Amino acid sequence: MIATWRADGAVERLCTGWPTFDEASRGGFVLGKLGFLLGAPNAGKTAVAASLADRWLRQGVAVGVLCVDEDAGDFLTRLAVMCGVSLDDAEKRSAATLATVEAALASLPLKLYGPEWTIQAAAADLHAWMQSRGITRGAFFADSVQTITCDAALDATSLRTFVGANIKALAGAAARHRLAVLATGEIPRAAYDAGRGDDTRAGKETGSIEFAAKAQLVLRRAKKDDALIHVSVPKLKRGTKDETAFCLRFDRSTHSLIEDDGGVAALATVSEIALAAARKRILELTTKRDDLGTPTKIAAAVGGKRQAVFVAAKAMIASGELVFVAGTYRSTEAVS
């Protein structure tokens, strides 16, 4: 194992831009490990996957997506909207719109795989493609664990064994190719509503997902605000805590997702002058220190009005002004 660690190098994580999750997970999803995005139909699972894919692609991370629940064309439409094309224009597909989408996406390290691909074949293809281009960080999305397939699942006689085989193949692909693997999955009807038991069991019905997951996220739309997604994280291995929870705000016009933790109320108690001063101190400090791995650590290091610093830090992370690199936050400008 020591020889393996020496060959692999340091553990790396892919930051999500969601401050609560990034802090709890010590920096995001781990390369070489398996995570799940679970929820009822229309809970926002694929939207979250597309948002993460877009973020990581623009950081130079190779992304492969095994599209079965949602076909490759629909997934690409999500990415087109995120690059500034309206949904109507993306569906009309005029020559000008297609040229815009191509210019925005063609250079990104993206591979889309259809239902004819197995988990093993798609992950191996992505890894070989990364090696041919000298890309060292990669993420693999599978949508969804109930509809994708692997070599062993072809002989499955029940949904439970089918999903179990897929989970084993996903975990194997993550470890073998050192990819951050994220699979979407449906939860049983009994888990549709929050507060009806332990969310760890939301993956129990089909394939014992909770045993394989290094990070298990359960998504639910807010009943009175369908743009708000409640996220519980009942399992988080190697994190600063075993579980956490937060909310994401979905903007349909841009297909973007940012953390919504009552930020409007928090901002109301902090003046614009205090926020501007905090932002300036944060930018200065991130050029000098390499131990600023969470908003809490940033606030403690900066000092002064800690609430202003904490709110400013979370806003800068959510907007992409700060990025997580080698265990600490740096300004995007400094990294580029």
Image (tube, grey):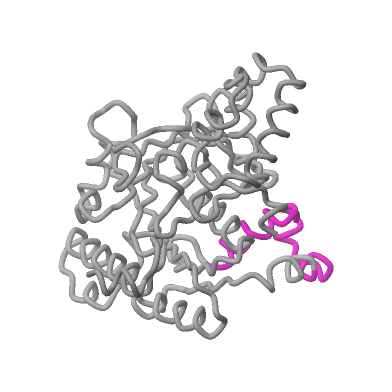
Q: Residue lying furthest bottom in this view? A: 132
Q: Is residue 30 above or below residue 293?
A: below
Query: Where is 133 relative to 34, above or below?
Result: below
User: In the rendered image, which quarter is residue 165 located in?
Assistant: bottom left
User: Residue 79 lies in magenta, yes or no?
Assistant: yes
Secondary structure predominantly adopted by residues drawn in magenta: helix
Query: Which corner quadrant holds the C terminus?
Result: bottom right
2, above or below 265, in the image: below
| Residue segment shown in magenta | 72-99
* Residue at x 73% of width, y 27% of height: 277
**Does residue 213 appear left or right of residue 250 in this picture?**
left
Lateral position of residue 121 relative to residue 57, left or right = left
Q: Residue at x 62, y 27 (%)?
A: 309
**Which residue is at 36% across, 47% downward?**
38
Name the residue nearer the viewer: 31 or 149: 31
Q: Nearer the viewer, residue 197 or 190?
A: 197
Image point 56% across, 23% down: which residue?
A: 262
Question: Where's residue 22, x and y in %?
Answer: 47, 43
